[in-house]
Amino acid sequence: MKRLLLLLAVLVPALGFAKIPDDEDILRKIMDSSSPFYYTNLMMRYENLEKLSEEEYHYLYYGYAYHENYKPTATNKAVEDLYASMIGLNADRPDSKQIEYIISVCNEAMMVDPFSPTVLNMLVFAYGSRGDKVREEAYFYHLQGILETIKSSGDGRTEKYPMHIIMFSHAVDVVSSMGVAAKRPEIISRSVEYIPLEEPRRVPDGKIRGFYFDYSRIYRNKPEDVTFKKKRTWQFNNLGPREYK
């Protein structure tokens, strides 16, 4: 089950099944120590690689926006190191030292962003390459859980019903997981960005030309030194830098 930057292609759910994040509900439940969604317990179970339910992933992912470690505009140097380590990597016959380094860098990257689909995907690949089926399957389950959480938060086909993210990179990863080529994201409002597709995607009721994402949580507690900019540069497979300012 080795996977290298080949995320699952899961169809975006119909709006009728969307679970739009309710911030008041999320905050109330993750702060209640008697709640099954008490955040300390959820995060502990996630870090211990336990399987969570769809609802638990929902509260875990969106609840992170209230965690003291949530710094969505911070530079994640470990991710940059991860991209660099992938240059020249032989995915079919990786060197054991490379694999150990990738695992180490991924663990460091998760200190800043514990729900990065890219990092989770690389951990699936790394542990699969090492023959550790238990951790490979555990991280694969986490990867599925995070992608499904975002995809189920809105159909993403209109600005009115966007998918909700807590990190800009997650939107790019979600679109990549659908197996479609995308253009550079465009910020269209102070809370929504749009990622147009290279080619329209045909669906039973028409065509999808791109996907909308609500990024409002990222700037909700914006640091003073972070400025709002209309366009950002995004690159995924060719490992280019991202601009957040």
Image (cartoon, rainbow, N blue to C red):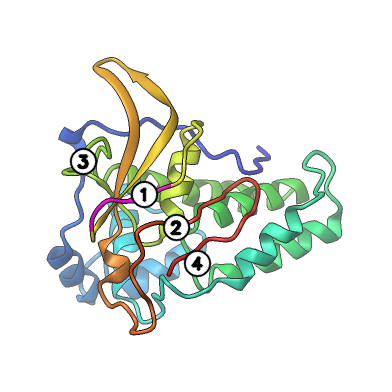
Between 90 and 53, the residue placed more toward the observer is 90
- Name the secondary structure under disc 4: helix
Q: Reply above or below: 116 against 180.
A: below
Residue reaching furthest bottom? Answer: 224
Tag 4 residue: 47
Question: How far apart, in angstroms, are the residues tagged by discs 3 and 1?
Answer: 23 Å
Between 81 and 47, the residue placed more toward the observer is 81
Q: Which mark is residue 18?
A: 3
Comes first in the chain, label 1 or label 2? 1
Can residue 51 be seen at all in this image of the molecule?
A: no
Q: Which residues are magenta?
A: 185-189
From the image, give the main secondary structure of the stretch colored magenta.
loop
Comes first in the chain, label 2 or label 4? 4
Question: How far apart, in angstroms, are the residues tagged by discs 1 and 2?
Answer: 7 Å
Quarter of the image where one finds residue 73: bottom left
Label 2 Cα crowd, 10 Å radius (few <14 / some 14-19 / many 20+): few
Q: Residue at x 58, y 68 (%)?
A: 109
